[in-house]
Image: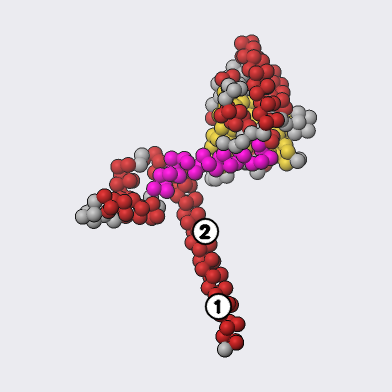
């Protein structure tokens, strides 16, 4: 998790204390969507640090229809925000339209909120367009004295956005996802390490990498981690990374060989 600047941390602490009773009262009164939007705009400004007049846009028009709010930084669209009434339970179906809007605009992020619950989604530019939940916050249970809660809020702050901490957090979550780890366990490099360790423990037993792979796939890794679009996406990313590593290794060997040849050339000329 990122280190939160003290100035931002102080603002977050103060406004957790300020907005928790506001949200509790709004929920008690069961205010409608329009009043919830008003609260959310105040929170975007006072909690998350966006300029309410220049960086938060109401009723963002897209192809003749509207999303409730949008954030813009340096005149570039950052994210679309779908707001529901505070008493309404958030569901993934609520965010689908906003995700479609964001994809049409080339935006990577969508936020779904009812003021109390905040969900940040990454748009997945695939066919069909999909989305992935990256951050989920219940604002009313946040502890202003807990560093982990302050760090979680900071991911969506303007200051954090400028430093790309949300994207870095998403990349870390992806790298540690069960799909990525499951795919990594099946790579030749990992299988070779497991084979060497097994042979060290049982030196008289012949074991090859394919046997280990079959045990992992059939008996160790859950089927849900091996099948589906997310598992396939993880395998593709690992394969691309391996290809880049091989190309980089080949490039370094070529440069080293050329440098050696260049160093030897003056000696040959002198002889």
In the rendered image, residue 57, in percent from the top left (x then y), is placed at: 74, 31
Nearer-the-camera pick, 39 or 208: 208
Mark nearest the camera among 2 and 1 is 1
Nearer-the-camera pick, 116 or 256: 256
Residue bearing the label numbered 1: 261
Say left or right for 177 vs 66: left
Residue 97 shown in magenta: no
In the rendered image, residue 220, in percent from the top left (x then y), is placed at: 32, 42
Rendered position, 230 above or below 66: below
Locate the C terminus and report the quarter of the image it occupies: bottom right
* Residue appearing at x 64%, y 41% in the figure: 164
Is residue 217 at least partly visible in the picture?
A: yes
Rendered position, 265 above or below 139: below
Rendered position, 91 above or below 263: above
Is residue 98 at least partly visible in the picture?
A: no
Q: Quadrant of residue 127?
A: top right
Rendered position, 29 above or below 45: above
Residue 167 shown in magenta: yes
In the rendered image, residue 46, in percent from the top left (x then y), is placed at: 71, 25
Q: Are marks 2 and 1 in contact (CB under 8 Å)?
A: no
Residue bearing the label numbered 2: 244
Q: Seen from this angle, which residue lies furthest top?
A: 29
* Residue appearing at x 65%, y 43% in the figure: 106
Q: Earlier in the sequence, mark 2 or mark 1?
A: 2
Say left or right for 204 vs 119: left
* Stretch of the chain drawn in magenta: 160-185
Q: Secondary structure at mark 2?
A: helix
* Residue appearing at x 60%, y 37% in the figure: 2
Nearer-the-camera pick, 221 or 88: 221
């Amino acid at each position: 998790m990122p280190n939160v600047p003290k100035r931002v941390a102080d603002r977050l602490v103060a406004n957790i204390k300020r907005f928790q009773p506001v949200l509790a009262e709004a929920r008690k009164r069961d205010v409608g969507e329009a009043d919830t939007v008003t609260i959310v705009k105040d929170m975007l400004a006072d909690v998350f640090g966006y300029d309410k007049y220049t960086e938060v846009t109401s009723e963002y028009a897209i192809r003749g229809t509207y999303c409730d709010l949008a954030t813009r930084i340096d005149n570039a669209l950052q994210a679309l925000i779908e707001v529901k009434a505070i008493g309404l339970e958030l569901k993934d179906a609520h965010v689908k339209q906003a995700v479609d809007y964001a994809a049409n605009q080339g935006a990577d992020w969508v936020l779904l909120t009812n003021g109390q619950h905040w969900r940040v989604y990454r748009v997945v530019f695939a066919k069909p367009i999909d989305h992935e939940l990256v951050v989920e916050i219940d604002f009313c249970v946040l502890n202003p004295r807990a560093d982990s809660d302050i760090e979680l809020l900071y991911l969506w702050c303007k200051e954090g956005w400028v430093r790309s901490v949300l994207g870095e957090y998403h990349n870390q979550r992806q790298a540690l996802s069960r799909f990525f780890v499951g795919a990594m366990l099946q790579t030749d490099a990992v299988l070779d390490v497991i084979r060497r360790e097994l042979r060290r423990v049982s030196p008289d037993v012949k074991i090859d990498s394919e046997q280990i792979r079959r045990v992992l796939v059939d008996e160790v890794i859950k089927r849900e981690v091996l099948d589906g679009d997310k598992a396939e996406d993880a395998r593709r990313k690992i394969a691309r990374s391996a290809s880049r590593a091989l190309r980089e290794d080949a490039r370094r060997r070529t440069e080293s060989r050329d440098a050696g040849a260049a160093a030897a050339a003056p000696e040959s000329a002198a002889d």
